[in-house]
Structure formats: structure tokens, C-alpha cells
Amino acid sequence: MKEAVENIVTMLAEEKDSVEVSEIVDGNTSTIEVRVAESDMGRLIGRQGRTVKAIRSLLFFAGQKHKKRFNLQIVED
């Protein structure tokens, strides 16, 4: 799932070199942390959080299929 999130975020970002995605696995729970440039933060979150909600929804349904739980965190530097 890390690769899928990385592809989505990279396509959304203007500064593609600053995209960093890491995954922390703890049992059946995976936390995916995303770091982007400050100028791309609004683009990633979207209007009223719609874009990030859509990514989280994709992770939820993928987790249902794989019997895992995926959390998405956007890390601000």
C-alpha cells in the first residue's frame, strides 16, 4: 500500500522530489506517513479535506480486503 500512496501523492505534488512516504507496521496495523513540500500541503489535503479523505477511503477498503488496518498521517515539518 505504501507504493500506491506514494504514486498518488507524487502525481498530486508539484515538487515531486520532496515527496517522502514511510510505513510503520505494528501487527495488523500499518501507519503510512507522508511528507510533502509546504507548497504542496494544500494540494494534498484538498478543499475541505476531500482529497485526503478520498485517499483514506481507498486505504480503508484495501485494508478490508487484506484484513489489515491502514492509517494515513500527513507529517508537517
Image (cartoon, grey):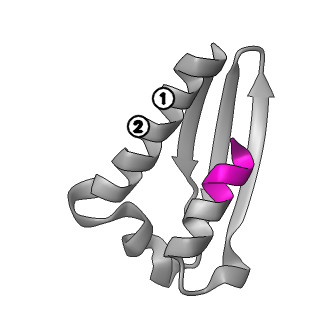
Residue extending farthest to the front is 65
In screen coordinates, is 50 left or right of 10?
A: left
**Mark 2 lies on residue:** 57
Magenta highlight range: 1-6
**Mark 1 lies on residue:** 60
- Residue 25, placed above or below residue 37: above
Q: Amino acid at mark 2?
A: Ser
**Mark 1 and mark 2: span between their CA atoms?**
5 Å
Q: Secondary structure at mark 2?
A: helix
Q: Amino acid at mark 1?
A: Phe
Q: Residue at x 56, y 34 (%)?
A: 71
In screen coordinates, is 27 left or right of 58?
A: right
Residue 18 percent coordinates (x, y): 69, 79
Q: Which secondary structure class fits the magenta region best?
A: helix
Is residue 58 magenta-colored?
A: no
Residue 49 percent coordinates (x, y): 29, 55
Quadrant housing residue 66:
top right
- Looking at this view, is 64 or 31 the one in front? 64
- Looking at this view, is 14 or 38 the one in front? 14
In screen coordinates, is 3 left or right of 52?
A: right
